[in-house]
């Protein structure tokens, strides 16, 4: 089934790369946008993925969810839509399959570079045919990847304070604009520590599994992440790095409240 899923996701990537007659609209705020390709890719994935696993349910960012059961697909048709709308070529397709609420399979595809990241629970993480693993860099040599809550700018001051506190502790900071891809970069050892103030399950379900199967650490703040609601997400290559960031985030969240 993994080969079949990858073929479906690559086909969805071809839909994404065809930008002819692209329509862009907002979803509530000027920062939160969707394109006609988001909807086309999601509907294609909904049809094809539920066909290869009859009885499975599906939840996507654009059209929501339908059905219940043991297996559920959690899909972001284009993670990094703002990048995509501007043709920045840093956007991904994220597909996770949960079994009884826990991710069992995760796929993140970057069609511009043809990078296919995948993980199966307890069977490791891969980029293409190559097994991947998080780095072993200490915090002082780590690359910190984060964002500043573009959709809910009232949280931005908290996010900036977290970045300000992390910057002297780490090597540098990056922002790519696609959570799924950033988590995969962490899993592959290209970045080392990650924080986002609020992510939906479709943003991180696949990436979180890929990080864990690559030997990394993922969680929310003082608890496990939720696959039923939005939550803050922390991820890291090393447990001690995770704990430093978690402490900073907890303190700043308490200050915001």
Image (cartoon, rainbow, N blue to C red):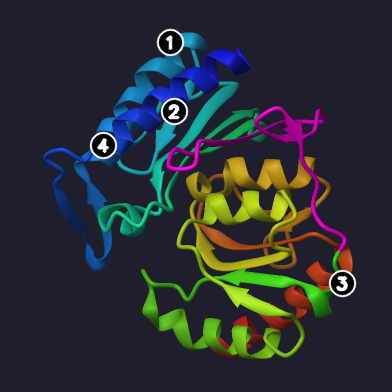
Circle 2 sits on which residue? Answer: 58
* Position of residue 61 measured from the top left corner of the image (x, y, whole percent): 37, 44
Cα gap from disc 1 to disc 3, whole angstroms: 45 Å
**Discs 1, 3 touching: Cβ within 8 Å:** no
| Residue occupied by mark 3 | 138
Q: Which residue is mark 1?
A: 51
Q: Are marks 1 and 4 in contact (CB under 8 Å)?
A: no
Please report whichever mark, 2 or 1, sits nearer to the chain's N-terminal start.
1
Name the side, left or right, on which 146 lies relative to 59. Answer: right
Bin the neighbour count of mark 4 within 10 Å (Cα to Cα): few under 14, some 14-19, many 20 and up. Answer: some
CA separation, marks 2 and 1? 11 Å
Q: Residues within 10 Å of mark 2 (few under 14, many from 20)?
A: many
**Which mark is drawn over residue 133?**
none
The answer to which of marks 4 and 3 sits earlier in the sequence is: 4
Choose top left, top right, bottom left or bottom right for residue 164: bottom right
Residue 251 % position (x, y)? 69, 85
Who is closer to the viewer here, 58 or 166?
166
Q: Residues within 10 Å of mark 1 (few under 14, many from 20)?
A: few
Q: Taking 139 as reference, is 32 left or right? A: left
Judged from the image, the secondary structure of the residue bearing numbered disc 3 is: loop
Mark 3–mark 2 Cα distance, whole angstroms, equals 39 Å
The residue carrying pointer 3 sits among few (fewer than 14), some (14 to 19) or many (20 or more) residues within 10 Å by Cα, namely: some
What residue range appears in magenta? 110-136
């Amino acid at each position: 089934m993994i080969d079949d899923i990858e073929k479906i996701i690559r086909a969805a990537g071809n839909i994404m790369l065809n930008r002819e007659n692209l329509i862009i609209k907002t979803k509530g705020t000027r920062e939160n946008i969707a394109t006609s390709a988001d909807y086309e890719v999601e509907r294609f994935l909904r049809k094809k993925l539920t066909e290869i696993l009859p009885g499975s349910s599906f939840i996507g960012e654009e059209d929501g969810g339908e059905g219940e059961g043991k297996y559920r697909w959690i899909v972001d048709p284009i993670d990094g839509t703002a990048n995509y709308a501007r043709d920045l070529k840093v956007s991904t397709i994220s597909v996770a399959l949960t079994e009884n609420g826990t991710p069992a399979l995760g796929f993140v595809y970057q069609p511009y570079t043809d990078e296919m990241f995948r993980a199966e629970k307890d069977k490791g993480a891969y980029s293409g045919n190559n097994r991947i693993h998080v780095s072993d860099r200490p915090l002082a040599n780590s690359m910190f990847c984060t964002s500043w809550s573009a959709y809910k700018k009232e949280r931005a001051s908290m996010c900036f304070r977290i970045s300000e506190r992390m910057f002297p502790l780490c090597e540098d900071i990056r922002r790519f604009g696609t959570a799924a891809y950033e988590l995969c970069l962490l899993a592959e050892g290209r970045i080392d520590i990650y924080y986002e103030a609020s992510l939906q399950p479709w943003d991180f379900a696949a990436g979180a599994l890929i990080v864990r199967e690559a030997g990394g650490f993922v969680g929310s703040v003082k608890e496990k992440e939720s696959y039923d609601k939005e939550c803050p997400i922390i991820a890291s290559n090393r447990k001690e790095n995770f704990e430093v960031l978690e402490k900073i985030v907890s303190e700043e969240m308490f200050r915001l409240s």
